[in-house]
Image: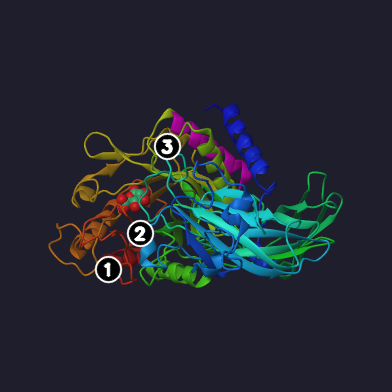
Amino acid sequence: MNKTRRILAVMACAFCFTAMSAQTAPMVMNAAQRECVNLCGPWKAIVDQMDNGFYNYRWTRKPDRESFFADEHYFQNTTRLIEYDFDVASELRVPGDWNTQDPMYLYYEGTIWYRRTFNASPKPGMRYYLWFGAVNYEAIVGLNGRSIGEHRGGFTPFDFEVTDLLKEGQNSVVVKVNNARHQDNVPTLNCDWWNYGGITREVRLLEVPETFIREFSVRLSDDGRSIEGWARIDGQQAAGQEVRIAIPELKFKASATVGTDGLAQFSGKAKPVFWSPSNPKLYDVAITTATDKVSDRIGFRTIKADGRHLLLNGEEIFCKGISIHEEQLYDGGGRAWSESHARELLGAAKELGCNFVRLAHYPHNENMTRIADEMGLMVWSEVPVYWTISWTNADTYANACSQVSDMITRDRNRASIIIWSVANETPRSPERLEFLSGLIDLAHELDPTRLVSAAMEKQEMRGNVLTVNDELLQKSDLISFNEYVGWYDGDVEKCRRVTWSFPVEKPIIITELGCGVKSGYHGNADERFTEEYGVELYKAQIEMLENMPWLNGLSPWILKDFRSPRRQLAIIQGVYNRKGLLDENGTKKDCWQILHDWYETR
Ligand code: GCB
């Protein structure tokens, strides 16, 4: 795919999205701060393995009135032939994966229909959006009997404007959720984590004024002397409106007029205390127009790569990190989504001595990045372009672009995020290079203030010399890679034999290293999966890292054991990836202490 074809792919996707759905513009930001009807709680749920609520017996899509979107009731009029009734169906909690809500659903991949009724009282002059924090993987949404839009991608928010469809009194929202894996999806068929299905994050009916602040960026300028940004105003009276930005604690005020493109750009001198892990200072920011007001808590900092140096606020920083999957720390896992889940996971990272977390392998819920802001943890945020994506499929590329763009739109005001990552461990080829180069360009275009990279792979040269020889290094801002010396690559002693050599001078972040350890399982230090192996591996890795030509940080794999259907060794794995420093119940393994003690010295 050349650049023109790539742009066409993105445009084609945007067009078909518009044509299929009511969503014609980027999502509403800061959804949690908006007036809303909260649609979390129990929803009625019907399992539909054959997609019977959607297709007829000739596998043709049913008109809405014959599909489950119609939300008909057998029990209200038993003379009609209706073969479903949400009123008598079982329930699933929203937010939440379905897999951990009932043992029957643990391995389920396919369709489950969700239905929720709610009361509304739409006000004249206001607009309404049905907003979803995330649904894995495909969501087709209906309101009051009509399907209104679709979304694909399991980890980013989306919304549909429903101003003209909302009724006074009772409304019914029906969502067809399907988490079947497909080669052309992002992620693809094969990955090393649990394919949790369901409405996994919050759902809200948002209320905004006719002309409202849809999106905004407030950040420190490159030279650290001004605060600058923009607001995107949506609505009939947008052009010509004045947008005012105030940061009372800094006595900062700026204003700008909205252009015909809906954008207002502002800038003004300011001397904020810079956000950093040692002082995660956040400021209350208010953005106001004649008709709308939004507020946020925002930190100000710069992040730069300069040759081998990684500079936070102009000063060298070493990223003491850990990788994290979005699984709850306690109670045997399940998708994490709440503020308390985020506090538990990130609190454990702090206890380990981290100032950095890699949120693998997809954008985590917004609580994670907001609490990271608050706790002073720098963040690597990533899209699930993982392993063997369909590099030449234009729809796959368009979907990956949407995920990059939605991740950035949602979190562009989070000081904690220092790196956007576009991929993990993808096999080198010209097609992959073009695909990922496009994503890196897109991320840089959408956000010129952060570093962009991908987790790459290492190679071995002659004589125990390891390197990262990847064409993507020309595009990425970092040398970032997964290495696993002593686990997938040789024995523990290999860490002591190898040396490293890098083809370019950029900051180095090792995105993964580690080994499987079954909590409480003991043996000799060379026996795989024992606590002793874990301790030796971490000790040997640390010796190796100390001898690298330069190193700016690492995020070992991983904070806690997580479910993965690829991990089939009974007794030891039992469908858990065992590379956690904590086990699936949050209990520390012995290797935790080794990393903890090393981080204390850095
Ligand atoms: C990797 C992958 C990660 C896996 C891990 C492992 O390199 O990036 O998703 O879970 O290795 O445990 O094998």
Name the mark on residue 558.
Answer: 2
Which label sits in the foreground, 2 or 3?
2
Task: Give the secondary structure at mark 2.
Answer: loop
Q: In this rendering, is residue 284 above or below 152?
A: below
To which residue does mark 3 refer?
504
To which residue does mark 1 refer?
589
Q: Residue furthest left?
A: 524
* Mark pair 1, 3: CA separation: 36 Å
Q: Nearer the viewer, residue 144 or 410?
A: 144
Q: Earlier in the sequence, mark 1 or mark 2?
A: 2
Residue 368, x across and y down, in percent: 51, 63
Residue 250, x across and y down, in percent: 72, 67
Q: Quadrant of residue 302?
A: bottom right
Q: Is mark 3 within 8 Å of ligand 1?
A: no
Q: Residues within 10 Å of mark 3 (few under 14, many from 20)?
A: some
| Kind of residue indicated by mark 2 | Ile
Q: Residue furthest front?
A: 79
Q: Is residue 73 left or right of residue 111?
A: right
Residue 344, x across and y down, in percent: 44, 71
Q: Main secondary structure of the magenta part?
A: helix
